[in-house]
Amino acid sequence: MAFDKLGRFFGISNDDEDELEKEEYATSNKDDNENLPLNSVSRDNVVSIKSGLNSAKSKIVLYEPRVYSDAKDVAQNLLNNKAVVINFSRMEDSSARRIVDFITGTVYALNGEIQRIGDKIFLATPPKFVTDGKISDLIDKKDNLS
């Protein structure tokens, strides 16, 4: 085999034998592929890492509603699998409570979560988002360290 490679390098090998070997190799590979289970991974396909990154991007929408009718836009973002940070600092408390109730119902229907992350600031997430920890827990730990 080493002599064959050396002979091919210098151009003194028998080309008919090489073609016959290539045909036999291709035939044996076809047989091998037919015997593979359906769930086996084929290593012949090359996929760019960058192509998978663009399709898997998740979005977080920052929203600052001013009237109750803005709750529909927040709910629509949740339905589109986008997390929403809602700041109610520019709203009256009664309207903000109504929107929080509406968003809580939307989140419940989607199996998502809603969390208070600050004074008049909430985070609503669809089911594919995972949040870890709570802001109030972090503030309590900071107070205990002083």
Image (spheres, rainbow, N blue to C red):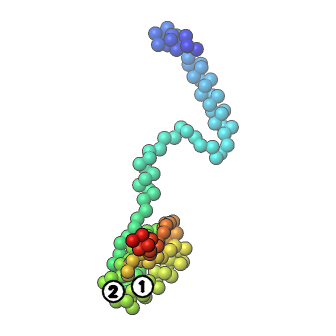
For disc 2, the neighbor class at 10 Å (few under 14, some 14 to 19, many from 20) is some
For disc 1, the neighbor class at 10 Å (few under 14, some 14 to 19, many from 20) is many
State the image coordinates of residue 113 (x, y, percent, origin top left).
50, 74
Who's the residue at 59% across and 28% down the image? 26
Q: What amino acid type should be assigned to the residue bearing mark 2?
A: Met
Would you name the residue on which mark 2 appears?
A: 91
> In the current view of this chain or complex, which residue is farthest to the left?
90
Measured along the vertical axis of the image, is residue 7 above or below residue 105? above
Q: Nearer the viewer, residue 27 or 68?
A: 68
State the image coordinates of residue 78 (x, y, percent, origin top left).
45, 73
Distance, label 1 to label 2, CA atoms, is: 10 Å
Who's the residue at 40% across and 67% down the image? 60
Disc 1 or disc 2, which is closer to the eye?
A: 2
Label pair 1/2, CB-CB below 8 angstroms: yes
Measured along the vertical axis of the image, is residue 62 above or below residue 70? above
| Quadrant of the frame with the N terminus | top right
Q: Is residue 28 left or right of residue 107?
A: right
Measured along the vertical axis of the image, is residue 94 above or below residue 119? below
Residue 129, which numbered label? none
State the image coordinates of residue 42 (x, y, percent, origin top left).
58, 40
Q: What amino acid type should be assigned to the residue bearing mark 1?
A: Ile
- Is residue 120 visible to us here? yes
Residue 99, which numbered label? 1
Q: Nearer the viewer, residue 78 or 22?
A: 78
> In the current view of this chain or complex, which residue is farthest to the front?
146
Q: Label 2's element?
A: loop
